[in-house]
Image: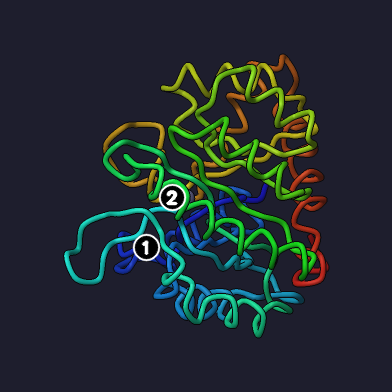
Amino acid sequence: MIDGHCHISDVAFDHDREAVLQRASDAGVAAVVAVTESFADFDAVLGFAEGHSGPYGGGLVVAPCLGVHPVQSDAETGQQRSARLEDLENVLQAIRSNSARLVGIGEVGLDFQPRIASSSVEKDSQKAVLKAQVELAKELGLPLNVHSRSAGRPTIEFLKECNAKDVVLHAFDGRAAIVRSGVDAGYFFSVPPSIVRSEQTQKLVNVVPLNQLLLETDSPALGPEKQGRNEPCNLKISCEEIARIKGVSIEEVRKITMQNTLKLFSRLRTICPRL
Ligand SMILES: [Zn+2]
């Protein structure tokens, strides 16, 4: 199994990150796709990827995506706010110069929760940040690891408008009709362990064909219980729940989601030929 979306650089893992990765490896996780939220995370994620590149040896592979999340914490106030073009300072250049080591660009997207984006100025600002990263992804031939919250329809419509082709929508919270429009665009959807307590995600799995589903944890968030830290070893929970909903074996879900992940993040095979 491959964790298609994980925040392995999060402070929640600072005291036991190696043990977390070992538990994941023991649970059958072959690789973790690590995303960033801001430029400040880039070096850490690249460093973990370097330390877990294992193309020949055993052990779990950390495969990096770099990108700027639609929600940023303001340097002056510490408050969360919509991303602005100034947050891309140094970012596009850093992505370009590291592009050979990356499997994708992310975490990018749109987040229209009222406390983050109450005005059209804020929404447009997020869209400008997303667009710049979509254009770079197309230029570099990299897929996009996409966040959306309270913005299901605008996210899918905007990605289509930007002509984005290689996309995974992670922990997508839009309605079935919007999910279908993403499926029609050929987008993948990744399913976190929180599916066991989310009727919305269970509905999504019903709508999306198995060959467009990926597994993810979004660790340390979106675990099977609302409280507590999520870990990549919980990937099997997503797998089991998809198998139950689709009425197929767990083995089938493992196999197909693995193929889907390698199709979308095609550089994974270059980074780790044994996958
Ligand atoms: Zn995330």
Is 158 placed left or right of 152 in the picture?
A: right
* Amino acid carrying mark 2 in the image: Ser
Q: CA distance from mark 1 to mark 2?
A: 8 Å
Query: Which residue was labeled with disc 2?
Result: 219
Identify which residue, 84 or 46, lies in the foreground. 84
Identify which residue, 165 or 129, lies in the foreground. 129
Query: Which residue was labeled with disc 1?
Result: 10
Q: Quick check: is the Cβ at mark 2 less than 8 Å away from ligand 1?
A: no
Callout count: 2
Q: Are marks 1 and 2 in contact (CB under 8 Å)?
A: yes
Q: Secondary structure at mark 2?
A: loop
> Where does the C terminus fall, quadrant-wise?
bottom right
- Mark seen at residue 56: none
Identify which residue, 199 or 168, lies in the foreground. 168
The residue lying at 56 percent from left, 80 percent from top is: 51
Image location (x, y in percent) of residue 252: 78, 30
Extreme-front residue of the structure: 121
- Residue 181 higher or lower than 102, as above or below: above
- Residue 273 higher or lower than 82, as above or below: below
Image location (x, y in percent) of residue 102: 67, 71
Label 1 Cα neighbours within 10 Å, binned few <14 / some 14-19 / many ≥20: some
Image location (x, y in percent) of residue 245: 64, 16
The residue lying at 41 percent from left, 32 percent from top is: 224
Extreme-left residue of the structure: 77
Q: Secondary structure at mark 1?
A: loop
- Residue 111 higher or lower than 241, as above or below: below
Asked which quadrant contains residue 269, the reply is: bottom right
The residue lying at 66 percent from left, 57 percent from top is: 30
* Amino acid carrying mark 1 in the image: Asp
- Residue 164 higher or lower than 149, as above or below: below
